[in-house]
Amino acid sequence: MMSAPVLASIRQAGWTRLGLLLVVASLTGCGEKAPAGGGGGKGGRKGGGPAPVVVAQAQMKVVPLEIDAIGAVEAIRSSAVRSQITGMMQKIAIQEGQDVKQGDLLFEIDSRPFRNALQSAEADRQKIHVQLENARAQVARYRTLSADEMVSKEQYQKIQDDARALEAQSGVSESAVANAKLQLEYSSIRAPISGRTGNLNVHEGDLIRQNEAGPALVTVNQLNPIYVTFGVPQQHLAALNRYRAEGTLAVRVVPPGGDDRPEKGDLTFVDNVVDSTTGTIKLKASFPNEQHRLWPGQFSTVSVTLSAPEVLVIPSSAVQNSQTGPHVFVIKEDNTADFRAITVERTHDNDAVVTKGLSAGETVVIDGQLRVVPGGPVEIKTLDGAAGGGAAGKGKGGKAKGKKKET
């Protein structure tokens, strides 16, 4: 066996070798990192070179001044058809969802009782006419006798009173005949307006009562032209009145669904009172609706165009907000970024309307603003990552980028 002093010397020798190996490894690692550190130089301290950005140009463009709202489609004319007489439903001359014109036959009620009533009224009228003719002849005869004093004045006066009474009865009989004819006409129910029929609430053979409470026999809605009713905040009332005084305001409506084509119409009504509960004012626009894309009761997006001025616009993605307000980075001729405070009046689609701080033709950054330093260099890129090729290329790349961000 080894003695304790021998074992201690062996352990000490092993630790010494391990320490030498660690020193050599650390020196080797330092030697490998030296080139990377030395290669950074001054450029590495400034953040790795110019900031890559995508740009677009400020340009003059016609941008409509619009008010957007949500509207409800409603028929200009709507008629709930009911019966004005009591009788049995004999015939239904239409189908549900059928287009009808004013005066078209919708329903027929059994007309036999009303035809009999008309014949009776005409017979009574004829009887009274015969009696009236006889009374008038008596008046003429007694007038001569009274002049010759062959009858008393009282007798002549009674003959005249009888004739006047029969004349009144003749008028009543004429009214009775006219009323009987009207009741007979009511047995044929016709369309009061042109439009499309809705759900039928009656069947042939049903007993129909005059002015019966409950659902109408059918409802006819006019589909073209048609109204779209919507409300806008009362703050827009002054602008609406100002621009309406200059001419008719155009209105666009996009019906819900896959088709984004708008229907075009005109603003035709502004209510005379502001709703005090909502602070909005009611408007109506009229649309031809020849293709029946707008349907009563439907909700749609509405845009009222007040005017269409030519203004300075930039892509809305170029606008950055800070505590001092909106700003953009403008690219100067030496490819450095200039911090520029601007005033944005409004936005429309992907464009921001600028009223102060920019001029037409200036180039602004629309993507990559986080790496831009005011006064620092930039490298203009296109959407595919390549370097931009001049002002025309910048504008094209900028517009494309704006569309991409919108989607």
Image (tube, rainbow, N blue to C red):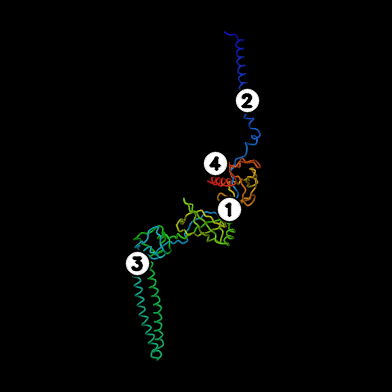
Dot 1 and dot 3 residues touching (CB under 8 Å): no
Q: Provide residue 4's location: percent of width, then percent of height.
A: 60, 10
At numbered mark 4, what does the secondary structure look like: helix, strand or loop? loop
Amino acid on which disc 2 is placed:
Gly
Which is nearer the N-term, disc 2 or disc 3? Answer: 2
Q: CA distance from mark 1 to mark 3?
A: 69 Å
Badge 3 is on which residue?
Answer: 111
Q: Provide residue 75's location: percent of width, then percent of height.
A: 47, 59
Amino acid on which disc 4 is placed:
Asp
- Left or right: 191, with 15 as reference point: left
* Front-most of residues 216 and 334: 334
The nearer-to-camera label among 1 and 3 is 1
Dot 2 and dot 3 residues touching (CB under 8 Å): no
Q: CA distance from mark 4 to mark 3?
A: 81 Å
**10 Å neighbourhood of mark 1: few (<14), some, or many (≥20)?**
some
At numbered mark 1, what does the secondary structure look like: helix, strand or loop? strand
The nearer-to-camera label among 4 and 3 is 4
Badge 4 is on which residue?
Answer: 384
At numbered mark 2, what does the secondary structure look like: helix, strand or loop? helix
The nearer-to-camera label among 2 and 3 is 2
